[in-house]
Amino acid sequence: MADLTEGPVTITSVKATAHGVRLKSFAFNSGTVSSLSGTAFVSFASLGNALTAQVGPLGSLLHGAGLNLSQAGPGEVKANLSLVLTSGSATWRVSRLSGNKLDVRLVSSSGLPAPVLSSIQDVALKIPKLPLGLTVRSVNVTPQGVTGRVLGHDVSFGG
């Protein structure tokens, strides 16, 4: 599968298991799947690029500061920033906002001035449309990035 991109967010992998596959022909080229379940993965690099792209002029400053994200705890990511005049850190909570959006909400910071933080307090990131009608049901922050639990029901495939 090729990477799925929507705006600045890239899903680099989707892994799903199909249950109840019913074929419509003997050519095995179309049918219906009763249910699909699996995961979709967004790397920290993609999430960092998405954050910097969403916050306007501050984005280029953050990107230049080497916005490197890492897991901070359950559902949270952390960045250490070294800006020209100051350095500090910020921690965001990542959750599913709605069907195809992630909410990235600032929960704590240290050493960064309020003007820097104002545009990164609460950011809604649109995620790519997933194949086969899969939808993100929940998200989890892992040491490698953000993994979404995906589900689909009564999915048609082929011709």
Image: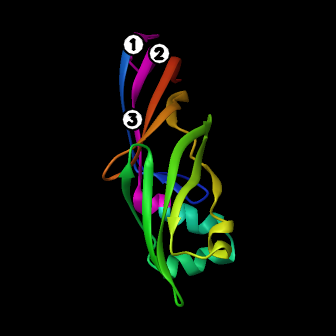
In the displayed structure image, the side of residue 36 where residue 112 appears, left or right: right
Tell me what residue is drawn at x 50 percent, y 22 percent.
152
Q: Is residue 16 above or below residue 28?
A: below
Which amino acid, mark 3? Thr
How far is the residue under mark 2 from the one under mark 3? 22 Å
Q: Is residue 131 above or below residue 43?
A: above
Q: Nearer the viewer, mark 1 or mark 3?
A: 3
* Nearest the eye: 71 or 136: 71
Which amino acid, mark 2? Gly
Tell me what residue is drawn at x 55 percent, y 75 percent.
112
In the displayed structure image, the side of residue 118 where residue 72 appears, left or right: left
Q: Which residue is mark 2?
A: 31
Give me the disc on residue 21: 1
Q: Main secondary structure of the magenta part?
A: strand
Which amino acid, mark 1? Val
Q: Nearer the viewer, mark 2 or mark 3?
A: 3
Q: Which residues are magenta?
A: 21-47
Residue 19 percent across, percent down from the top left = 37, 14
Give me the disc on residue 39: 3
